[in-house]
């Protein structure tokens, strides 16, 4: 189509064929510049004015994609180096905390439960002893209480489970990991003691009636 | 093809922003977990103090109930049986002459301040009969 279309020279009024290849050189320089500019700015057929843009099935993008498209096929070397540097710094900075976070997530729930159980155990023992007037250690795992609502304090599963027998039932308290009560040791009719193990701590716990 | 640029992969800005957001997320998570750990540590210290000071108190009261006399050195000997990461101290408050107040024995577990937490102390007082 281009070969059949003619141009009118703006300067000399002479008719030229635009793109026949042989006659292209005969076009005046101004026309060549005009056509080049028109093509550059998006007219797909150069200065073939009778064909409007919207009628063309060839879009400007398809005609000259390099004018419009900046589609990236890959990273440049400097970009890859920058990304690697940033990732190295970020991973290096986060490596320690991330391991610590996962460690905390794994242990924190058990620790909270153990502390709650330890506090509950203290309250149950203290309340039981407060109501008791005298005690009698039957063996290392059982203390008979008299005068209160709690009749018997039992130590089970190596001191990780406490059992309080009351008139109306039994209260069982499972102590958490790292916390346990040692064997009950009688002192006299009103006092007994047992070793307490809590993580790295270890100490004798004295229980006294009426207090 | 309708004139839009077809993209392949991420741009450098997108990768950098993603890493930045990940770092912020992990940093926030770390702060939350650290706060939780501090709370657990404080609760552990409190639980330890409750047991230890109550035990000492009961032992001193048992001594006094059996007719024993109060002796600071004796209480310090009791404290030596305790294997704790924190120091327990005992002191007797002075009684002013002419007043009707009774002497008070003060038991104190002291948690020293560290880089991550402030120090605190737990006190239990025993009023002599």
Image (spheres, rainbow, N blue to C red):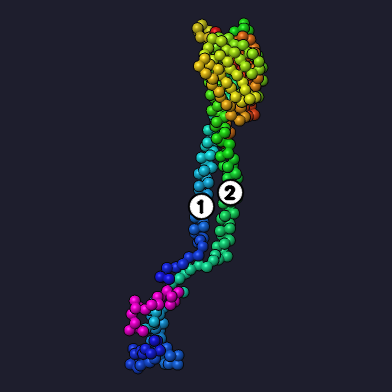
Judged left or right of residue A16, residue A194 is: right
Q: Secondary structure at mark 2?
A: helix
Judged left or right of residue B109, residue A16 is: left
Is A39 rendered above or below residue B121?
below
Q: Position of residue B63 (x, y in %)?
A: 62, 10
Q: Residues within 10 Å of mark 1 (few under 14, many from 20)?
A: some
Q: Dividing the image into 4 quarters, which one contains the N terminus of chain B?
A: bottom left
Q: Dividing the image into 4 quarters, which one contains the C terminus of chain B?
A: top right
Question: Which label is found at residue B20?
Answer: 1
Magenta extent? A48-65
Q: Position of residue A92 (x, y in %)?
A: 60, 50
Tell me how far mark 1 sits from mark 2, CA to CA: 12 Å
Give the residue at x 40% y 75%.
Answer: A59
Q: Which residue is mark 2?
A: A93
Chain ID, mark 2: A
Residue A56 belongs to the span the image colors magenta? yes
Q: Quadrant of residue A114?
A: top right
Is A204 rendered above or below residue B44?
above
Is B129 rendered above or below residue A23?
above
Give the residue at x 33% y 84%.
Answer: A50
């Amino acid at each position: 189509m281009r070969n059949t279309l003619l141009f009118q020279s703006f300067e000399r009024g002479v008719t030229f064929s635009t793109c026949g290849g042989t006659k292209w050189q005969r076009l005046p320089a101004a026309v060549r510049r005009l056509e080049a500019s028109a093509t550059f700015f998006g007219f797909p057929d150069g200065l073939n004015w009778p064909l409007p843009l919207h009628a063309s099935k060839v879009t400007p993008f398809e005609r000259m994609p390099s004018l419009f498209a900046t589609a990236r096929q890959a990273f440049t070397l400097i970009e890859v180096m920058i990304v690697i540097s940033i990732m190295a710094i970020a991973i290096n900075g986060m490596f320690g905390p991330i391991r610590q976070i996962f460690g905390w997530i794994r242990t924190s729930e058990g620790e909270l439960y153990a502390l709650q159980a330890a506090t509950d155990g203290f309250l149950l023992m203290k309340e039981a002893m407060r109501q008791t007037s005298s005690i009698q250690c039957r063996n290392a795992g059982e203390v008979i209480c008299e005068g209160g609502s709690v009749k018997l304090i039992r130590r089970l599963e190596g001191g990780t489970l406490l059992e309080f027998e009351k008139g109306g039932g039994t209260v069982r308290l499972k102590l958490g990991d790292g916390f346990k009560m040692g064997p009950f040791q009688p002192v006299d009719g009103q006092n007994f003691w047992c070793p307490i193990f809590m993580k790295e701590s270890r100490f004798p716990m004295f229980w006294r009636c009426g207090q | 093809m309708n004139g839009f640029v077809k993209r392949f992969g991420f741009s450098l800005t997108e990768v950098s922003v993603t890493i930045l957001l990940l770092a912020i997320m992990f940093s926030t998570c770390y702060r939350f977990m650290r706060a939780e750990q501090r709370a657990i540590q404080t609760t552990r210290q409190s639980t330890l103090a409750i047991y230890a000071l109550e035990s000492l108190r009961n032992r001193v009261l048992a001594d006094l109930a059996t007719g024993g006399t109060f002796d600071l050195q004796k209480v310090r000997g009791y404290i030596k049986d305790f294997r704790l990461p924190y120091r327990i101290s005992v002191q007797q408050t002075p009684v002013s002459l002419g007043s009707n107040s009774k002497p008070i024995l003060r038991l104190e577990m002291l948690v020293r301040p560290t880089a991550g937490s402030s120090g605190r102390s737990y006190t239990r007082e025993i009023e002599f009969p």
